[in-house]
Amino acid sequence: MSDFDSAASTPANTGHRSSKRRRVYDDSEASTPRYSSPDELADHKPNRSSKLKTRQDLGGRRRSHSSDGSVDELDHTYHGRNRSRSSSIDSHRSSHSSPGAPSPPVYKPLKLNYKPKFILKGHRKGVAQVRFSPDGRWIASCSADSTIKIWDAATGKHMRTLEGHLAGVSTIAWSPDSNTIASGSDDKTIRLWHRATGKPYPAPLLGHHNYVYSLAFSPKGNMLVSGSYDEAVFLWDLRARRLMRSLPAHSDPVGGVDFIRDGTLVCSCSTDGLT
């Protein structure tokens, strides 16, 4: 007996095979739609393929966006910023161009119109230096005519002339209380003068070996510093009328000297390029 005959003659086997086919058919029915005719199946295939194509196209687009999505996002933000900037610039221009907006102020350069208050005349030769008193009431001037003159700073009136040097006076300095004037001359001496009387102190300060070119009082008025063409800086004690110290600071004439505000330091400058 052949296998085919045994399979055909056995009803249990046929039932078992039919149930398997039914299960397969039922599974296919659950996964795929049922069509009544081959024509419907034929009509439905193109639609299904078109849907698949559209899905594939969408998937490809999504993949392309996801693959370089950062670039697309950057482009989007860049274009968005450009639009916002252009809109803000346009609005700013429109606000400025609007007739109701105020125009910016026009600044004109200031023209200085200084006028002389008064001119002080009286010296016979060139004026070397001029100084205001600390209280602002007086003006002292020194000249190559060997004199010092005192002027009223409010009116310009000549008050008095101080005479006593034997050569031209190159520098003057006021004491902090505005009552004493120190003068340095080409006669190598330093003299102190009473402003109120115009008379000199009894003894001049001697020590420099060349022209006295610069002077300065200490803040307390008890010391005086002087610079000379002899390249030295001298410190003087005004109460004792004596030389305290000689500072050989430079290798050229000393052009300027001064005290610091608390009187603890002295600075000097010279034509040797040093301070």
Image (cartoon, rainbow, N blue to C red):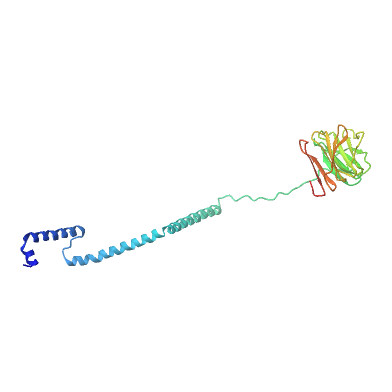
What residue lies at 18% left-to-right and 67% top-to-bottom?
A: 39
Q: Position of residue 144 (x, y in %)?
A: 90, 45
| Closer to us: 65 or 160 | 65
Q: Is residue 3 left or right of residue 224?
A: left
Q: Position of residue 197 (x, y in %)?
A: 90, 33
Q: Residue furthest top?
A: 239
**Can see residue 24?**
yes
| Closer to us: 179 or 85 | 179
Quadrant in which the N terminus appears? bottom left
- Quadrant in which residue 159 is drawn: top right
Q: Where 93 falls versus 166 (above or below)?
A: below
Q: Residue furthest front?
A: 1
| Closer to us: 225 or 221 | 225
**Can see residue 174?**
no
What residue lies at 50% left-to-right and 55% top-to-bottom?
A: 85
| Closer to us: 68 or 44 | 68
Q: Position of residue 193 (x, y in %)?
A: 88, 35
- Quadrant in which residue 64 is drawn: bottom left
Q: Is residue 10 left or right of residue 266?
A: left
Q: Position of residue 229 (x, y in %)?
A: 87, 46
Q: How many marks?
A: 0
